[in-house]
Image (cartoon, rainbow, N blue to C red):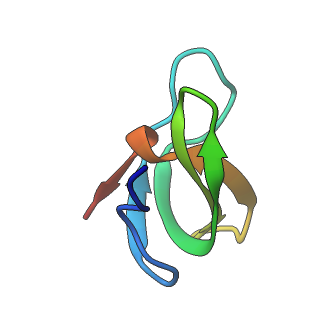
Amino acid sequence: MGSHKFRIGERLRFQASGLTSSQSGIYEVLALMPQERGAGFQYRLKSTVDNHQRVALEDALSRL
């Protein structure tokens, strides 16, 4: 089954895909969310710039 790669409080780089209007940048992990069917683990994130929150899949995130 596996487990989340990142932890709450960790700062990560979010890379938006070309299919969304999301903004790439540095985000802090607020919560670990369940695995999306066939797509991997999800995270609740908060932007370090403007406090905007979003949900992102693990494969859109990388360590700084």
In the image, what residue occupies the spot 64% across and 38% down? 36
State the residue lying farthest toward the bottom: 9
Q: Which corner quadrant of the image does residue 15 belong to?
A: top left
Q: Nearer the viewer, residue 53 or 43?
A: 43
- The quarter in which the C terminus is drawn is bottom left
Q: Which corner quadrant of the image does residue 50 belong to?
A: bottom right
* Residue 37, above or below 31: above
* Residue 56, above or below 50: above
Q: Is residue 27 left or right of residue 61?
A: right
Q: Is residue 48 visible from the viewing direction of this image?
A: no
Q: Nearer the viewer, residue 13 or 61?
A: 61
| Image location of residue 31, percent across then percent down | 65, 73
Q: Nearer the viewer, residue 21 or 60?
A: 60
Q: Is residue 60 left or right of residue 57?
A: left
Q: Nearer the viewer, residue 52 or 43?
A: 43
Q: Is residue 19 visible from the viewing direction of this image?
A: yes
In the image, what residue occupies the spot 55% across and 26% down? 38
| Image location of residue 44, percent across then percent down | 67, 62
* Residue 31, above or below 39: below
In the image, what residue occupies the spot 27% across and 62% down? 63
In the image, what residue occupies the spot 39% across and 64% down? 12
